[in-house]
Amino acid sequence: MFEFLAQHNLTGLLLGICSFLIIGIFHPLVIKGEYYLGVRCWWGFLIIGIATGILSLLTDNFFWQTLLAVVAFSSFWSILEVFEQRERVRKGWFPANPRRHPSAKTKDDV
């Protein structure tokens, strides 16, 4: 498969599509992680980032090196986004988890 991609100059295009999908997957992970776990979920993103970064260094295939590196740095970026998500929840742009936030109002309370 990789020979076909390289022969037809499609490797970059496939990497771009995969990068787009990876970033798209991390967006809801940040939202759900903050909702259910709070900002302490940043540890999970750190562990995933370090693990995939190390795997990227240990992999010989260029395609998989690149995808693992994209996952690693998307994880690292998600750490910042978790803390920014907390602020978005505080401002009321996203719902707060009523089980974690005693002051969070539900639709019935309004």
Image (cartoon, grey):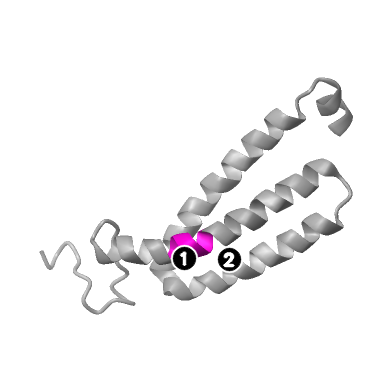
Q: Are marks 2 and 1 in contact (CB under 8 Å)?
A: yes
Q: Is residue 82 in view from this perspective?
A: yes
* Looking at the image, residue 60 lies above or below residue 96: above
Instruction: Locate residue 70, reporting x and y percent.
Output: 66, 49
Name the quadrant of the C terminus. Answer: bottom left
> Residue at the top extreme?
8
- Which secondary structure dominates the residues rendered in magenta? helix
Per the image, label 1 sits on a secondary structure element best described as helix
- Disc nearest the viewer among 2 and 1: 2
Quadrant of residue 18 in the image? top right
- Where is the N terminus found, in terms of image quarters? top right
Q: Looking at numbered disc 2 in the image, what kind of residue is underneath it?
A: Phe
Report how far apart the C-alphas of labels 2 and 1 lie in the structure.
10 Å
**Residue 33 shows which numbered tag?**
1
Horizontal side of residue 56 vs 101, given as left or right: right
Q: For mark 1, does the 10 Å Cα neighbourhood hold few (<14), some (14 to 19), or many (20 or more) residues?
A: some
- In the rendered image, residue 96, in percent from the top left (x then y), is placed at 29, 67
- The question of residue 43 being in magenta is answered with no
Residue at 89% x, 49% y is: 60
The answer to whether 17 appears left or right of 67 in the picture is left
Q: Residue at label 2? A: 45
Q: How many marks?
A: 2
Q: Which residues are magenta?
A: 78-82
Mark nearer the N terminus (2 vs 1): 1
- The image position of residue 62, as x and y in percent, is 83, 42
* 58 versus 101 height, above or below: above
Q: Is residue 80 magenta?
A: yes
The residue at the point 58 percent across, 66 percent down is 45
Where 57 falls versus 16 (above or below)?
below
Answer whether residue 1 is visible to the viewer in this image: no
In this view, 73 is above or below 22 = below
- Secondary-structure class at tag 2: helix
